[in-house]
Image (tube, helix red, strand yellow):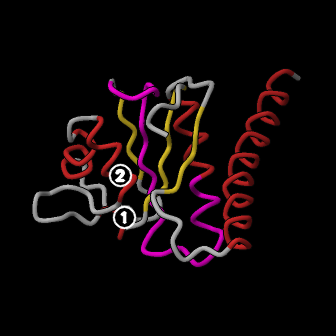
Amino acid sequence: MTEWKGDILAVGVTEKDLARDANSKFENVILRKIDSKLGGLLAEASSEEDFSGKVGQSTVLRITGLGSKRVGLIGLGQSPSTPSPFKGLGEAVVEAAKSSQASSVAVVLASSEGLSAQSKLSTAYAIASGIEFVVYIWVIYIKACDL
C-alpha cells in the first residue's frame, strides 16, 4: 500500500486506530507503517490538527516518501456498525479528490478486524455508493449548468 503510485491514499480510521504506545507511535499496524515511511509526519499532523477519527473528520497532507502525492485520514467514529460512516468515507474521498484535482485515489481501512466476509462486502458497497452518489450529483450539476 505504501508503494502504490497515485494522487491520494485515503485511509479510513476509527478512533481506536489512532491509539498510541508509550513512544507516541501508532499501535495500528497500517498507520504505523505509513507513519514510519513519512518520518512521523502522520502522527504529528493528527496531533496538531486534533484529528481523533470521529465521523466527519478528515485531514489530507501533501507528502513525499510514499508512492502517492497525498495521504488522507478520514474518520469513521468509534466502531462503525452501520454502512453510514463508510458511505461518508466514500463521500470524503470524492471531496478530497476534487479539492486536490486528483485523478487517482486508493482507499484502505486502517483495520478490518471484526468484519466478516459479508460485512466486508457491505463495507465496500457503502464506500462505493458514497463515491457514486457524490459523483452522480456532480455530473447532474455539470449537465444542469450546460443547459
Q: Do the residues labelled 2 and 1 touch (CB within 8 Å)?
A: yes
Q: Earlier in the sequence, mark 2 or mark 1?
A: 1
Residue at image coords 42%, 65%:
14
**Residue holding disc 1:** 17
Task: Say above or below: 140 vs 64.
Answer: below
| Residue 74 part of the magenta-drawn span | yes
**Residue holding disc 2:** 31
Residue at image coords 42%, 30%:
70
Question: Disc 1 residue type?
Answer: Asp
Numbered disc 1: secondary structure:
helix
Question: Disc 2 residue type?
Answer: Leu
Q: Give the range drawn in magenta.
A: 65-89
Where residue 92 sits in the image (x, y, percent)? 55, 47
Q: Seen in the image, is 90 located left or right of residue 37?
A: right
Q: In which quarter of the image is residue 65?
A: top left
Name the quadrant of the C terminus. Answer: top right
Residue at image coords 27%, 35%:
38
| Residue 134 part of the magenta-drawn span | no
Residue at image coords 19%, 48%:
48
| Of residues 131 and 118, the one drawn nearer to the viewer in this rendering | 118
Where residue 69 sits in the image (x, y, percent)? 44, 25
Q: Seen in the image, is 116 located left or right of residue 108?
A: right
Where residue 79 sits in the image (x, y, percent)? 47, 75
